[in-house]
Amino acid sequence: MTEYILPLQKLIEEFSRLPGVGQKTAARYAFAVLDMSEEEAENFACAIVNAKKNVKECEICGNLTDQARCVICSDEKRNPEVVCVVEDAKTLMAMEKVKEYNGTYHVLGGAISPMNGITPADLRIKELITRIGTQDIKEIIIATNPNIDGETTAMYLSRLIAPLGVRVTRLAYGVPVGADLEYADEVTLLRALDGRRDIH
């Protein structure tokens, strides 16, 4: 491997810690930063620090926000009786591209994964049950990813929620099993949303 001077090497190492970024891409990003003016580099660094300091979880749904409540939970035009449960904010943003869904969301913060040591206690499931108990929710749409962890989470949630008298549905996937929802196109997500089914 090519040896770089220490400041550059450190920058490459930091970029390579990002998901899906290998050494070559990290080096390209690092050189791109060096090509920036000092002002551009400072703005770039400030944007990272400011996002880390100011972006937090919505107190209601767990979506990303810089306020106490996210823009979706603050929108009075949304239907609070329907809640779409997703694993993370990236999936929520993908669902929002459909532009046909007018309900609200609940971000779990991941999926149940015994292999990775993630249990129901590690997710925002307790907060979801609290919402069902305190809000007039008629339907929970489970939109976890169609992989083993996502299916495990969906079954766990359906068994937990069904006795509460709330309709529990699962997206009818037009995406292959094992794929991530965040990469699905709007048409596929719309079909999946329209074709959701009850979980028994």
Image: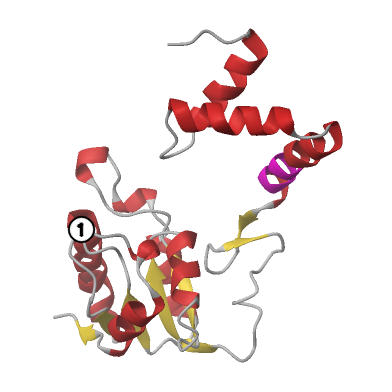
Query: Relative to 136, is 180 above or below?
Result: above
Q: Magenta residues, as a range?
A: 47-52
Q: What residue type is labelled 1?
A: Gly
Please name whichever residue, 106 or 178, is drawn nearer the observer in this view of the structure: 178
The residue depicted at 39 percent of the width and 63 percent of the height is 182
Residue 80, percent from left and from top: 51, 86
The residue depicted at 45 percent of the width and 86 percent of the height is 101
Label 1 element class: loop
Query: Relative to 119, is 135 above or below?
Result: below
Query: Relative to 41, is 91 above or below?
Result: below
Q: How crowded is mark 1: few (under 14 residues within 10 Å), some or many (20 or more)?
A: few
Q: Is residue 87 visible?
A: yes
Residue 46, percent from left and from top: 77, 40
Asked whether, in this view, residue 131 is left or right of residue 33, the answer is left
Instruction: Give the quarter of the image for residue 176.
Output: bottom left
Q: Can residue 17 be seen in this view?
A: no
Instruction: Give the quarter of the image for residue 177.
Output: bottom left
Q: Is the magenta stretch mostly helix, strand or loop?
A: helix
Residue 71, percent from left and from top: 65, 74
Query: Relative to 73, is 12 above or below?
Result: above
Asked whether, in this view, residue 128 is left or right of residue 154, the answer is right
What residue is shown with label 1? 178
Q: In which quarter of the image is the N terminus?
A: top left
Please name whichever residue, 118 or 43, is drawn nearer the observer in this view of the structure: 43
Asked whether, in this view, residue 42 is left or right of residue 155, the answer is right
